[in-house]
Amino acid sequence: MIYLDYQATTPLAPEARAAMLRWLADDGFANPHSAHRMGRAAAAAVEVAREQVAALLPPGGRVVFTASATEALNLAIRGGQGGPVAVSAIEHAAVRDTARWQGIDVELPVGSDGVIDPEAVLPDGARLVAVMQVNNEIGTIQPVARLAERAKAAGALFLCDAVQGGGKLAPPRGADLIALSAHKLHGPKGIGALWVRDGVNLTPLIHGGGQEGGLRSGTLSPALCAGFGAAAALAAARMEEDAAHVSALWDAAREVLSRWTLNGSETLRWKGNLNLRLDGLDVSRLMSECRGVMFSAGSACASGSGRPSHVLRAIGLGDAQAKTSIRLGFGRYTTREEVVEACRALDAAAKAQGA
């Protein structure tokens, strides 16, 4: 098996697993919100993890732990004041669907390269602008610093879904709200975070015990927090090394798949995401014939919908072209040999189809 689906989830880092095991042991089960000694020890572990995650983010804010980045994005959008919300046309469903649920969705278009115009017209009276740092389907990096600057000048808050960029790129400058997910940076599933700039007020979506500064009630898992923190610290320490490794894997994959067409910008992107298309390709058949390669036809969150990708449509592809596209995702624990072997297998299977 060769795993090339890093945008869906990443392998758990050994360091994160080790950090979690301490809080899964017989003496590590305490509730971190209890006042006794065991509870205080668990609470201390949570706060260490909070500092480790915060180190990936700008100064001048606080980290609120959530059960997922989806919850974090819902809190950021639904927990704010009323008024128009502007989102890019290629946002993750966690942003698009939440904005639409509120009936205040204004989409900002992207070019054929999958990058939003940093001078795009923002709607009058917008109270929130949401643009992701790195697109989860095609890997394009968005001009979030400039968009945040313009949103602020227009009196709006800026929300950045940094799920695909967290721990890989510098944090988005100027953002007021930033969402992260542990399992996209080699941490455990079941925990995310929302960074909230100092002075930004939100209304909680989950009520109960008033945990997380009153913004997110519910008992925290010290094990999940510790795993998230360890993964974040490792990502910060390895950021340059990981980026260089991913760039080399990209070059190897592109060399093998040179006849395939790249979806999205070749330069303004995270190179751990390779989204390609090939005329005449039957992606379902390719997946069946290359079962030893774990890859995707798009977002894992929308894989069962049967609908063509809204991201590929937004960059101008028709439904037929969108349905001939695949996404390869690789990262820290992928080897060059795996990438070359997988890409050769995919290309050979595509040729056998006549694509």
Image: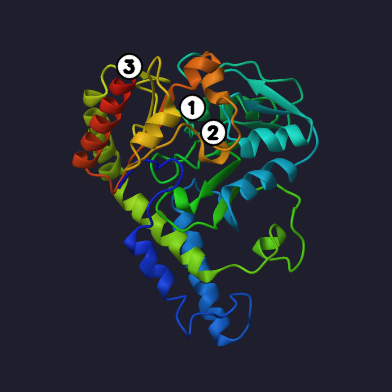
Secondary element type, mark 3: loop
The residue under the point 48% across, 47% down is: 57
Q: Camera-side residue: 223 or 51?
A: 223
Of marks 1 and 2, which one's residue comes earlier in the chain?
A: 2
Q: Circles 1 and 2: CB distance less than 8 Å?
A: yes
- x and y percentages locating residue 131 in the rendered image: 57, 31
- Residue for point 69% across, 47% down: 75
**3 vs 2, front mark:** 3
According to the image, label 2 marks what residue? 132
Measuring from the top left, give residue 101's x and y in whole percent. Answer: 76, 36
Residue, x 64% and y 28% (percent of image)? 87
Image-based side of 328 in relation to 253, left or right: right
Residue labelled with disc 1: 142
Is residue 306 positioned above or below 167 on the image?
above
Compare residues 322 and 215 and report the one nearer the observer: 322
Picture quarter containing residue 262? Answer: top left
Q: Residues within 10 Å of mark 1 (few under 14, many from 20)?
A: many
Of pointers 3 and 2, the one earlier in the residue sequence: 2
Dots 3, 1 in contact, CB < 8 A:
no
Residue drawn at x 55%, y 39% is: 161
Residue under label 3: 354
Looking at the picture, which amino acid does disc 1 mark? Gln
Looking at numbered disc 3 in the image, what kind of residue is underneath it? Gly
